[in-house]
Image: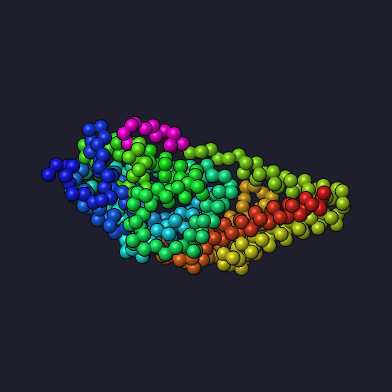
Amino acid sequence: MSESQLALPESVTRLEVEGKTVYIVGTAHVSKQSVEDVIDTIAAVGPDSVCIELCAARHRSLIERDNWKKMDLFKVLKQGKALFLFVQLIMSSFYRKLGKKLGVEPGAEMLEGAKQAEAVGAELVLADRDIEITLKRVWGYLNLWNKFKMFAELLAGLIFGEKIDEDLIENMKKQDQLESIMEVFAKSFPEVKKRLIDERDVYLAEKIRTAPGEKIVAVVGAAHVPGITEHIYKEQSLDELLVVPPKSIVPKILKWAIPALVIFLLVRGFSKEGLEHFKDDITIWILVNGILSAIGAAVAFGHPLTVIASFVGAPLTSLNPMIAAGFVAGIVQTWIKKPTVADFEGIPDAISTVKGFWSNTVTRILLVFMLANLGSAVGTWISLAWIGARAA
């Protein structure tokens, strides 16, 4: 039987590229049928290379399931990566929910591609861009409003996620439905689609095009198939796609400008209105900042001492650009409720429910960090406006 007559699954797209035959398996990331399609395609083709839509970091996280045990929570808080980690946990939660409903682990089709590559002696190519670069490019090119909007939609998806069954997942592999989904997504977050889908189409296409051998099987999410098909016929430079956007200078300016403005208003109020006015301004600053930060810690079910630490720390840390209120709250919570190995091991199960985010010691610390920070930030702006209005 010639290669053109091979009995291949409907999800496979066959291309002739520069003397190579490329078989692209378009998968749904949580689908039993996709796993079977990968097995059947590799068995039928006998490829020289198998490309999978994973980078080294994501591949390692799938094969090393106990990575949670190695997480340095203090380092996460110190480096301000709690929000970044929390978003990853929300996304993981979404896929785990799907996996439990459909009886298949998220990423199973990619792991199966790697397994089958080894079984047939094909070279494995990790064809995706590094996940950290992708996420930094997605986040770095969003304005503040869209960052808030995207996080809110992710959180809403966690809490109010729609019922998703196996038929819906399989129907999503159909070209017309995928295009309509991408159009809706592009309207809400055009920059996210560009960085998350379009750029990776180009990256994946180039990695597949340059994979060794004459017969290539590529296992990718179905949403990438049209883009890969468009870009794979010509050489693509990947240098620009690996550049991490520089951090905006605005947050750095605000870090110092806001404390400076607060101090200026306090001094101005004292010099113009006297000691009593100054005392009232100080009271406003302490109570509004402290109470709202404490409320944030309490909403996260922080320990009473953590709530107190948030109240005491927020008015001081808001005047110190080097320390965040959430960091103080998170460290106190970590000291009082030190996570155990079992807590880290339990993260994958905990994030499968909303309640689990609050009940697991590790994820609760992340919540304390973020919500205490959020409360302090809101308190800073409210008290700043209040004090400013009194000085006018």
Magenta span has 75?
Answer: no
At 33% from the left edge and 32% from the top edge, which residue is drawn? 234
At 36% from the left edge and 59% from the top edge, which residue is drawn? 168
What x and y, as percent, mark residue 246?
53, 38
Classify 344 as above or below 132. Answer: below
Span of residues in magenta: 232-243
* Residue 348 placement, left or right of 261: left
| Corner quadrant of residue 94 | bottom left
At 39% from the left edge and 62% from the top edge, which residue is drawn? 164
Most prominent secondary structure in the magenta stretch? loop
- Frontmost residue, 147 versus 132: 147
- Frontmost residue, 258 versus 159: 159
What x and y, as percent, mark residue 327?
58, 55
What x and y, as percent, mark residue 308?
65, 64
Image quarter where the N terminus lies is top left
At 38% from the left edge and 38% from the top edge, which residue is drawn? 202
